[in-house]
Amino acid sequence: MPLRGGGWVNSASKDPKKRTGLKLISLIIAILLWLYVVSQGATTTPQELINTPLKYHNLGEGLTLSGPDTVSLRIWGSLKRNGDNIAYVDLNGLGEGVYELPVHVEPVRGAMFTTVEPDKVEVVLKAVQEKELAIKYEIFKPPSPAYEVLDVVITPEKCLLQGGEDAIKKVKTVKCQLSLQDREGITFFYSPLLALDAGGRKINEGIRVIPEKVKVNVVLSRKKAEQKVGVKLLSSGNTAEGYQLRNLQMEPDFVTILGAESEVAGIQEVNTEVLELEGRKESFSQQLELMAPEGIKAFPSRVLVYVDIGKIDEKGGKQE
């Protein structure tokens, strides 16, 4: 039909049925084209299935959650591995309850198309419970056989458990494991705390231990051994001219020594300090210190020596 000004009017513009038909044809063509592109992309574009951690954002104060730890991402395209792929669930504004929530995925660099499996997860939110427990310790790597543990001090002595009621009920013990290998003397270090169930298995989910680590002070000492040994009297010099040493008595003549096992085992006797006899004319008694090796203690630490000195008669015999 002619249009004013010399133009023409499409007859389909005045026929509603023809306009609807054109729209349907356009839609069908678009769908077919999209299906073709997707099918071509599935055969020509590389795809990858990645297992990725599932994070939970905006957890309300005083709440604990339980839900899946990971989801799978199916990614089409050339991936740029410049960081973790982030899948997350938004918990903003949610209180206690059971929810089925959508999983969101942050844009993946280099990906043409990304899907997440599953796209929804079940999340349980519960009010946080608290419980106080004493901290125990376990020595899983002992010190050298030459050493023994004299004392262990844990600071603090107690910890606070936070988590869901069911999870807290499972915790029977909180302990730290001590490695004392290659340690000696007085030492300290920090050790993480482990929440364990009745079977000694570590509880990883639904529990928070406060503090996470404790300070451990340990006193290690060389193992002590005691042994009874003889006493050897050391003397120096001679009595005065015309006098002779008639007798020596020592009390006690056996003492007990105490020290490291490896050192004590090789000691058969302990020497006294030197008894000076030079120029002596009269009998006397004297206490002498025992000269025990370094690191060894003797009990008693002194002995009493009785020295009998007398004149020599003119015939060379003893004078009473």
Image: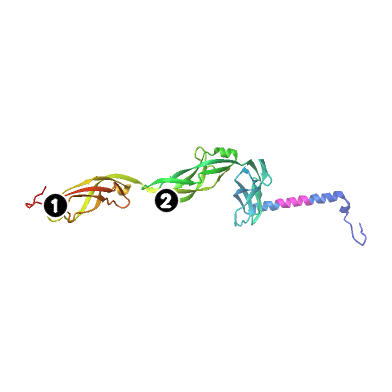
Residue 279, disc: none
Is residue 183 toward the left or the right of residue 282 in the image? right
Magenta stretch, overall SS: helix
Quick check: 172 above or below 49? above
Quick check: 166 above or below 307? above
At 75% from the left edge and 52% from the top edge, which residue is drawn? 30
Image location (x, y in percent) of residue 231: 24, 48
Determine the secondary structure under disc 2: strand
Image location (x, y in percent) of residue 214: 50, 48
Image location (x, y in percent) of residue 182: 41, 51
Q: Which residue is mark 2?
A: 186
Is residue 248 toward the left or the right of residue 317 in the image? right
Quadrant in the picture for residue 66: top right
Question: Is the residue marked by circle 2 packed among few (<14), some (14-19), or many (20+) residues within 10 Å?
Answer: few
Is residue 284 toward the left or the right of residue 83 in the image? left
Range drawn in magenta: 26-35
**Marked residue nearer the N-terminal end (1 or 2):** 2
Determine the secondary structure under disc 1: strand
Query: How many tags in the picture?
Result: 2
Q: Which residue is mark 1?
A: 244
Q: Nearer the viewer, residue 200 or 11?
A: 200
